[in-house]
Image (spheres, rainbow, N blue to C red):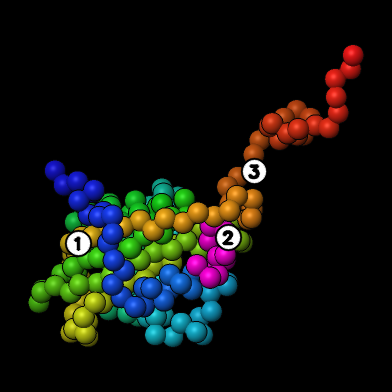
Amino acid sequence: MTSLSHYMPQRLPIRHEGTRRLFRLWESLRGERSAPDKDELPLTDMGPLLPWLGLTEADERGRQVWRLAGSGLAMLIGAGLEGQEVFRRWERFERETLQRMLGNVTTHAQPFVAQLALRDETGELAVELSAFPLRDPLMRTRLALLLMLPLTNEAVLFGPAEDARLLGLRTIWTTPIPGVEGSLTAPRPKGAHGFAPFTVIPGGRRD
């Protein structure tokens, strides 16, 4: 049995400069929140990264599906991804592991970085995969901003991937400041008098 802890070393480095660039940008945009709004992304300043970017969201079953996918992603893992389950053709361990990690991004605002070996009929291509949470204020949900960058210059001769092998996986710990942003979850239930649970009501006891 394969243990996920085998793929989660304490110090898995972020290898691609583009991944570090997106991480710095995401950190600067979110400030003290758990995630920035998707409309805050400066797309005009992200030119070289745009083909390798995608957005995923949870469907009604809780599975991550593609909402958008750039041309670079289409080259690496196939065209017509929108609306399809993320990595649906891959082996079960890689598919389910990355589904769980993307679920953590959209549910708990927890970014991650992974390194993979994509496989096609000609061989393997090493890539770095990262994902960061984005707020969708209109739908009051979170999306995962996904970036997949080849670690070699052989990407133009590759694809689409038939499968992938997980080489390393690391959670990127972030700590939002409580109370800085509004909750993306359903409103808390209120009591009979309209007050939220544990609300402190001004006043004192009568003697």
Q: Quadrant of the N terminus?
A: top left
View extreme (top): residue: 207
- Cα separation, mark 2 vs mark 1, equals 32 Å
Residue 167 image label: 1
Q: Quadrant of residue 79?
A: bottom left
Q: Is residue 199 above or below residue 105?
A: above
10 Å crowding of disc 3: few (<14), some (14-19), many (20+): few
Number of numbered markers: 3
Q: CA distance from mark 1 to mark 3?
A: 40 Å
Q: Give yes or no for residue 31 being in the magenta stretch.
A: yes
Mark 1 crowd level (few <14, some 14–19, many ≥20, 10 Å Cα) = some
Position in image of residue 87 (x %, y %):
28, 62
What whole-number distance in Å separates the C-alpha atoms at marks 3 and 2? 22 Å
For the residues bearing labels 2 and 1, Cβ distance under 8 angstroms: no
Say which label, 1 or 3, has the lower sequence index: 1
Disc 2 secondary structure class: loop
Mark 3 / mark 2, whichever is N-terminal = 2
Are the two marked residues, 1 and 3, in contact with CB atoms closer than 8 angstroms? no
Single out the mark in the foreground, 1 or 3.
1
Residues in magenta, as a range:
27-38
